[in-house]
Image (cartoon, helix red, strand yellow):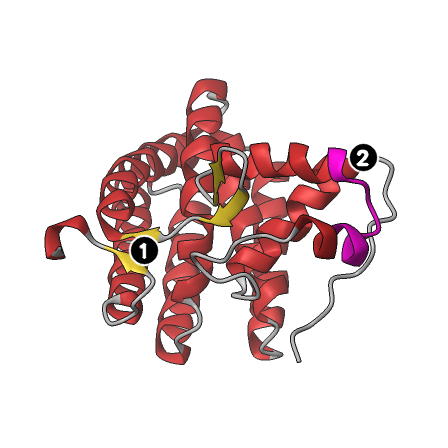
Amino acid sequence: MSEVPTPVIRSNLMDEVAQRLRDMVMDGRLEPGTRLNERVLCEQLEVSRTPLREAYRMLATEGLLELLPNRGAIVAPLSLAELDDTIEVLAALEELAGGLAATRIDEEELRRVQALHHEMVAHFLRRELKAYFEANQAIHFAILAATGNAVLEREYRVLNARVRRYRYIANLSAERWQESIEEHETIMELLTARDGPRLARQLRVHLMNKLAAVKQRLALNRDVVDPDAA
């Protein structure tokens, strides 16, 4: 039996509902192509239809849901073509962020990234994938924040939201998860050494390796939409 979501209790219902749905899409409880049942979700999350529909719209802008006129919403199919295009741009932003952060990060920011890294490794050792993923994302956002470039950070967050579930899927492979933690060790070494050029390259390599793992995992999945293969 699938896991029943925990009822929403926070005051900001729309954001909380959106996060719960986002988690359900990422971990596979809501699979690509699934039509969302408003009545069931309202009961599970203990909210009215208004915050639920607002959350639908938010997730639609992230590419996680598709809104169907007069028919509700479905989980967006996985598109390898869109993934390629998005990762191509995101990799360039990661590369830029690495180069800037290495020269601009201060000691307090560096200690925060190091603490997040240790937290992430602990989750890895305990095989806590969801907690690991959240710490992993926090590391990338902290590196972005260290650039001091608000435009770069904003654009990165928009694109990252669109491929967030793909990044989560990559670590469903035990081999890739191990490789990812090793790549993060190198990222931390280069950031601590403030080696901008090598850090920039490592962040690009890290993301492209993740893309390769996702595509390998999804290649035979019937829910993947690949226009080039049609």
Reading the chain from its start, which is encountered first: label 1 or label 2? Answer: 2
Residue 197 point in image, percent of width and height:
26, 40
Residue marked by disc 1: 206
Q: Residue at x 66, y 32 (%)?
A: 54
Instruction: Tell me the quarter of the picture where residue 124 sits.
Output: bottom right
Which of the pair 112/156 is nearer the observer?
156
Residue type, label 1: His
Residue type, label 2: Asn
- Quadrant for the N terminus in the image: bottom right
Q: Which residues are magenta?
A: 42-50
Residue 143 point in image, percent of width and height:
49, 39
Cα–Cα gap, marks 1 and 2: 35 Å
Look at the picture and state if 45 lies above or below 31: above
Instruction: Please tell me whether residue 195 belongs to the stretch shown in magenta.
Output: no
Which of the pair 140/78 is nearer the observer?
78
Question: Taking 36 as reference, is 212 left or right?
Answer: left
Which of the pair 83/111 is nearer the observer?
83
Question: Taking 89 as reference, is 134 left or right?
Answer: right
Residue 40 point in image, percent of width and height:
72, 57
Estimate how packed mark 1 is, as few (under 14), some (14 to 19) or many (20 or more) residues with alpha carbons within 10 Å: some
Which of the pair 110/148 is nearer the observer?
148
Residue marked by disc 2: 12
SS at circle 2: loop
Instruction: Please tell me whether residue 43 belongs to the stretch shown in magenta.
Output: yes
Q: Is residue 105 visible?
A: no
Estimate how packed mark 2 is, as few (under 14), some (14 to 19) or many (20 or more) residues with alpha carbons within 10 Å: few
- Report the residue that reaches farthest toward the front: 70
Residue 57 point in image, percent of width and height:
57, 32
Foreground mark, 1 or 2, reads 2
- Quadrant for the C terminus in the image: bottom left
The secondary structure making up most of the magenta span is helix
Q: Residue at x 57, y 66 (%)?
A: 29
